[in-house]
C-alpha cells in the first residue's frame, strides 16, 4: 500500500477489514508517532464530519473520480 500522504486531496473509496466502505476527499492525516501510536490515520470528508480511518484497519484504497 502506498503511503497515506500520497492520497491527500484525492477522492477515495476505502474499504476496511470489517468491510465498511467510506468515500470522500482525503482532507487530513495524522502521524502515529505524534499521537504515541505505531500507525498513521487518514481523514475523509463525509460532509457532516471527518471519518478518521487507521492504517491497520484499511483493506483497500481506491482513487475515484
Image: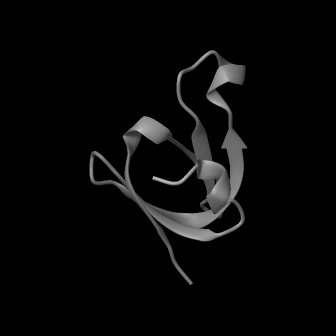
Res. 27 image quadrant: bottom right
Can see residue 3? yes
Can see residue 50? no
Residue 49: x and y, percent?
Answer: 64, 52
In this rendering, would 34 be left or right of 56?
A: right
In the rendered view, tell whether residue 18 sits above or below residue 65.
above
In this rendering, would 3 be left or right of 15?
A: right
Q: Residue furthest bottom?
A: 65
Residue 1: x and y, percent?
Answer: 45, 52
Res. 46 image quadrant: bottom right
Which residue occupies 34% across, 54% down?
20
Q: Residue furthest front?
A: 2
Question: Which one is nearer the viewer's eye here, 48 or 52?
Answer: 52
In the rendered view, tell whether residue 43 sits above or below residue 55.
below
Which residue occupies 56% across, 84% down?
65
Question: Which one is nearer the viewer's eye here, 17 or 39?
Answer: 39
Image label count: 0
Color scheme of the displayed model: one colour
Q: Residue furthest left?
A: 18
Question: Which one is nearer the viewer's eye here, 45 or 56?
Answer: 56
Which residue occupies 58% across, 49% down?
3
Which residue occupies 60% across, 71% down?
11
Amino acid at each position: 500500500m502506498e503511503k497515506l500522504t500520497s492520497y491527500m486531496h484525492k477522492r477515495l473509496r476505502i474499504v476496511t477489514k470489517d468491510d465498511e466502505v467510506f468515500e470522500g476527499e482525503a482532507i487530513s492525516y495524522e502521524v502515529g508517532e505524534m499521537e504515541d501510536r505505531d500507525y498513521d490515520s487518514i481523514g475523509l470528508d463525509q460532509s457532516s464530519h471527518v471519518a478518521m480511518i487507521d492504517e491497520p484497519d484499511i483493506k483497500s484504497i481506491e482513487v475515484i473520480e
